[in-house]
Amino acid sequence: MHWFSLVFLAALALATAARLWLSRRHVRHIAANRNAVPVEFAGRISLAAHQKAADYNVAKARAGVIETLTAAALTVALTFGGGLQLLSELCERAFQAGGYAHGIALIVSVVVISSAVDLPFSLYRTFVIETRFGFNRMSLRLFVFDMVKAAVVGALLGIPLVFVVLWLMARMGDFWWLTVWLVWVAFSLLVATIYPTFIAPLFNKFSPLEDASLRSRIEALLAKCGFRARGLFVMDGSKRSSHGNAYFTGFGAAKRIVLFDTLVSRLAPPELEAVLAHELGHFSRHHVWKRMLVGSAVSLALLWVLGWLMAQEWFYAALGVGSPGTAMALILFFMLAPSFTFLLQPLASLYSRLHEFEADAYAAQYADAGELVRALVKLYEDNAATLTPDPLHSAFYDSHPPAPARIARLQSLHA
């Protein structure tokens, strides 16, 4: 067995074992604190709601264990099991070996297989876990329509992108990775720009906020923060789930503020204003651009590594592939990258949590921090967010600060 085969197997085993260990810690920590509401939330969240959140998060974590093992098994089957080589040979029967059509067919085949493997887990999450805890409002018909529309949109956007990437890899010589990176950055900006107007409406209905009093309150907040948006919309999120949220989307003149209808119905106007002030904090502190810059830098480094690896014959042979090529190199690299980068995930989570704290501090300047605390407590309860996550699990996975730390920070700002 080639030395790189052993290195990849070790990385895959380590990442998989770490995920399983973190999940087990998370489940045990939540279960150990199930019968007592944390002191910070006493009198705000009932024991019944706290226990529901504990059971909900444990159910999701246990389902995630099977999903993690299945993903690892699929990776081994496609590489060392000869799955990718078999797919390549099947695609060669329909398309010229090494041609663009062959490469696109190979990549699409892997995406379809991965999606098919993930489908039972998605169905289980939606129609078993979410239904059991009273969150799911999606019918099977809507689920299928969403899946078909997502596949069509993905194909319309993804297949041309894959063709351009394969063309650049074949034509741009040793520095193809730089041109591919520039195309990827431009593509990401394009999708972010057109998403609010052309993609999101395919899945949800967006209606202007009709509550005149609430609209006036929000517009006053926007003026105070110096934020200009193209529109203030309410999204019919309730047709899929009872979970609530709010977000900003788009760039430049295409910026929109979107509120879930479940959020509007649940929060009082001052609480909703505080939540929007937090989202405005992300805009004011340029968090979206900062994350895009970091993500672009990481993608540039990864593409440079891929540029070196794809020129090495052992890269393919060590992963069970006897038909080297640009499309195969892309597939192999993006299959093995998560195993080698998993231990760096806490850095990304920490960076995101720091942004959340900054946005909270901004909200405390332009709205009432006490109202944001009340809003967050309602959202924690309504969304069954655990109040007692395992600290190490949270450090790896949570993009938002743990509930006790976040509430304590806001209360100090309010004081």
Image (tube, grey):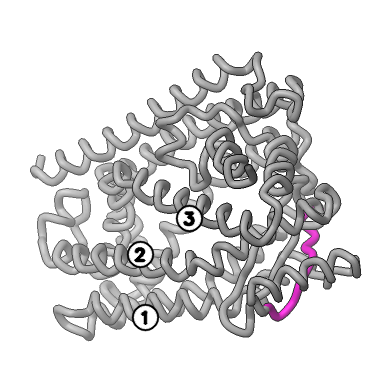
Q: Give the distance between the C-alpha atoms of the residues marked 2 and 1, in whole angstroms.
A: 17 Å
Specify the amino acid type for callout 1. Answer: Val
Q: Is residue 199 above or below residue 19?
A: below
**Viewer-nearest of discs 3 and 2:** 3
**Which secondary structure, mark 1?**
helix
Name the one closer to the observer, 12 or 292.
Answer: 292
Do callouts 3 and 2 mark residues in contact (Cβ within 8 Å)?
no
Specify the amino acid type for callout 3. Answer: His
**Residue 157 visible:** yes
- Quadrant of the frame with the N terminus: top left
Please indicate whether residue 333 sits to the left or right of residue 224 in the image: left
Residue at 73% over, 50% down: 244
Q: Residue furthest front?
A: 415
**Viewer-nearest of discs 2 and 1:** 2
**Is residue 234 on the magenta stretch?**
yes
**Is residue 191 on the magenta stretch?**
no
Please indicate whether residue 411 sits to the left or right of residue 262 in the image: left
Q: Residues within 10 Å of mark 3 (few under 14, many from 20)?
A: many
- Quadrant of the frame with the C terminus: top right
Q: Position of residue 369 (x, y in %)?
A: 67, 49
Instruction: Using the image, tell me which numbered label, if any, was put on residue 183.
Output: 1
- The quarter holding residue 87 reads bottom left
Q: Which residue is mark 2?
A: 294
Mark 3 and mark 2 lie on one chain; the one further toward the N terminus is 2
**Residue 144 visible:** no
Q: Which residue is mark 3?
A: 355
